Amino acid sequence: APQEHLDSAGLRWWVPHRYGPSLSGSLCEIFCSPKLMDGRTGRVDMRALALLARSFAGGRKRMRSLYPALASHLDGDPEGNIDGAEEEDDDRRSVSISLQRWPPEKIESKERSTEGRNAMRMGYSVAALQEMQLLHQLHFLIPSPQGHPNFILPLAIALDSDSNEDEKESAAAGGATSITSKSAAANDILAMIERNQRAAGKRQLASGSHLVLEPTPLNLQKVMSRYQRKNQGGTVIPPAVLASWCHDILSAISFCHSNHIVLRSLLPDQIHLDHSGTAKLSGLSKVMVLHGKDRIRDFDPLKFVRPKKERRDHSAEDVEPFAAPELLLGGTRYTKETDMWAFGALLANLLLGKQLFPGKDRVSKMTQVFKIVGVPGEDNYDRAKKFPFYSSNMYVIGEEGKKKKYNRGVEKALRHLLKAAFGGSVEGEYAGLIGLVDGLLHLDPKRRMTADDALGHQYMMEHSVNIERQEFCRRYVHDWLDLKENVLTKGKSSKSGILDSLKEQQRRHRPAERRRLSDGARGTPLTDGGGSAEKELKRKAFLIGASSGVDGDDLYNLDDLLGPSSSSKKPKHAKT
């Protein structure tokens, strides 16, 4: 979208990540960059500071009007002294944004179907306004302008040209800036996106209002579609990237649970990935805030079930791919435990490239669940047999016509499936993740790990130790940029060599190296640090991805990010 349209809509406060603001949103960290200091004199480099101020101003014309003293330091500079043509081009520069339908089409169509013919229509969906209010409340709990780093904070609401004044007022009351059609910025933003879609031959933008978000080029659904086993023939997501996503999603879930919020649904298309590879949750329309009395007591799933005597058959209903067993068996109450099961099933899908519990209906999915986590018994949540939808059809029948009684074997099943899909060379690198998933997938809800317990798991603690190591940071940056290029270009780009490298690694089968890495991982001392290093790691990847197209911008040099040994690789990432 044009920079001037965002400025006229009141979004000048949102500074594009051109000079690498910190993930915490602190301006102090931006201005404390060593690149702003003159190494010879030890004083502030006024030219570097003027370039940074020009980025905040939103253009060179506004730079001269807002910061005339700093603008004088760019006079006579080939990069700062500009004539009319260059100044006009700079003020017309575009800024990358992401748009998300608001409210989602499914929610809007459902609410419209429940409205009576003569019912009074509201300007906006009630569920969408509640979602916006809850999202902003979550962000305000974090002492940072950008809020929680693992949630997407909407920047504005882009309205259709046929939106009336009441809708605009309702959007403004929702907490986000309203880009109205009066300023023509909303029409220009949406019209430009539609022109780009038509020029690229893609599906045009759906009608209706949209949330304006920070650039998020990918979501987990796109990654999972690209990394399915049937499509790639055996490609696994790099362990450093997968561990980072696991930490990000867990942090978001833990933050919600600590504030008594149950997500209810955790789908791949709701988890977006920004240019640094940070996973961020979006779409809180289905969340549930626990009542005050429910926050201090444990739920008994059997007290919240559907009636046994119902006319329609629920066994053939479509269910969510990561639904917990108690919901599949007829439970109606979503809890923190159901969120943790969904998270464990999502991790297993990312690891294996396919669902661990495939099936389109309750019976087929529960059959797969019983095969992996074990059938109900005295030591394996025998109360599952009391749920209304529990059926003997969920068991696997043996040759003699008897039910097969599977014991719990999540870890064993994951190791077997991983080895069968990608070979034994990758099993050791994901041993910690397999252990974490094993603790999340229990038939008994009370035996599942909580979000805080999962963050304290050995796999997560080792990740906190690894991000302090420069070698791991370089590997993360390389793996993430390679994965992003591979997904965005669908493997057609010459830059994306992740498939060839992984296949080559599988062919070599270096057992000694694998044993060394495995032994080193087991013997790594655990610490509770790593939070600042995690932000620094993501910042480096973000800067490399976002620095493309910024000519002459040496405030953050790629050599400083990747290390001296990687200076020859700089052209590879210059256009990412």
Image: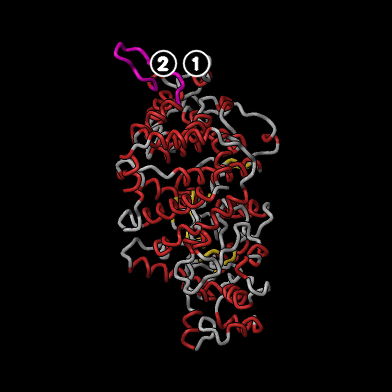
Label 1 or label 2, whichever comes before in sequence order: 1
Q: Secondary structure at mark 1?
A: loop
Task: Specify the segment rendered in magenta.
Answer: 394-410
Query: Which amino acid lies under the numbered mark 1 shown in the image of this protein?
Result: Gly
Distance between the Cα atoms at labels 1 and 2?
A: 9 Å
Asked whether 409 falls inside the magenta stretch, the response is yes
Q: Amino acid at mark 2?
A: Lys
- Residue 306, which numbered label? none
| Image location of residue 537, percent across then percent down | 55, 53
Residue at position x 54%, y 36% in the image: 459
- Label 1: few (<14), some or many (≥20) within 10 Å? few
List x then y, in percent, for residue 190: 45, 68
Query: How far from the left and from the top, in percent, is residue 551?
Result: 47, 74
- Which quadrant of the figure contains the C terminus? bottom left
> Could you tell me if the residues under marks 1 and 2 are in contact, i.e. CB atoms within 8 Å?
yes
- At x 45%, y 36%, the residue is 430
* Label number found at residue 377: 1
Which residue is disc 2 drawn over? 405
Magenta span main SS:
loop
Q: Residues within 10 Å of mark 2 (few under 14, many from 20)?
A: some
